[in-house]
């Protein structure tokens, strides 16, 4: 399922079982421009970067993710079995921005 949140630009908040929870603002940037991906820090979630996503979302396609076990993304048992949080994030990003899309990663941590 997903929830549509309306603001100055189209914003979609997605909560699905096969992807990480994420917020995706599409500003209508050209396909040749990189989408900006905002990653939260340790013990955080995508709401931590919401003010930045709102500002950048007016300039470029902008995505914020809840990493596994954070915010609205459930812990993925497969992570314990060898699949990494990076793999889960990449799978979500590839579904949102299929290759050869360019991504600009922005993140922080402790």
Image (spheres, grey):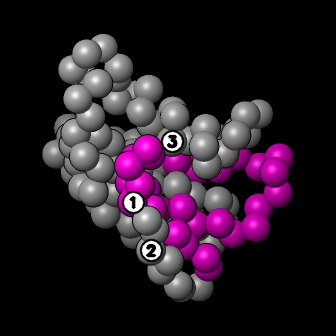
Q: CA distance from mark 1 to mark 2?
A: 8 Å
Which residue is labeled 2 in the image?
3
| Observer-nearest of 20 and 52 | 20
Residue 10 magenta-highlighted: yes
* Residue contact between numbered discs 3 and 2, judged by CB atoms under 8 Å: no
- Residue 82 in view, yes or no: yes
Res. 15 mark: 1
Q: Which residues are magenta?
A: 9-37
Query: Which residue lies most toward the left here?
Result: 43
Residue shown at the point (60%, 43%) measured from the top left: 95
> Please, what secondary structure does the residue beneath circle 1 have?
loop
Which residue is labeled 3 in the image?
92
Q: CA distance from mark 3 to mark 1?
A: 11 Å
Tell me where residue 42 sits by quadrant. Answer: top left
* Residue contact between numbered discs 1 and 2, judged by CB atoms under 8 Å: yes
Q: Residues within 10 Å of mark 3 (few under 14, many from 20)?
A: some
> Please, what secondary structure does the residue beneath circle 2 have?
strand
Q: Viewed as shown, does residue 5 lie left or right of 57? A: left
Q: CA distance from mark 3 to mark 2?
A: 17 Å
């Amino acid at each position: 399922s997903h929830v549509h949140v309306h603001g100055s630009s189209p914003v979609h908040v997605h909560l699905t079982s096969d992807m990480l929870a994420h917020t995706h603002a599409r500003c209508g940037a050209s396909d040749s421009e990189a989408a900006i991906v905002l990653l939260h820090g340790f013990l955080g979630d995508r709401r931590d970067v919401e003010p930045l996503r709102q500002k950048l979302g007016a300039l470029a396609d902008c995505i914020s993710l809840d990493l596994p076990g954070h915010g609205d993304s459930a812990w993925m048992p497969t992570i314990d079995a060898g699949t990494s949080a990076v793999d889960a994030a990449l799978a979500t990003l590839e579904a949102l921005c299929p290759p050869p899309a360019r991504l600009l990663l922005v993140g922080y941590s402790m």
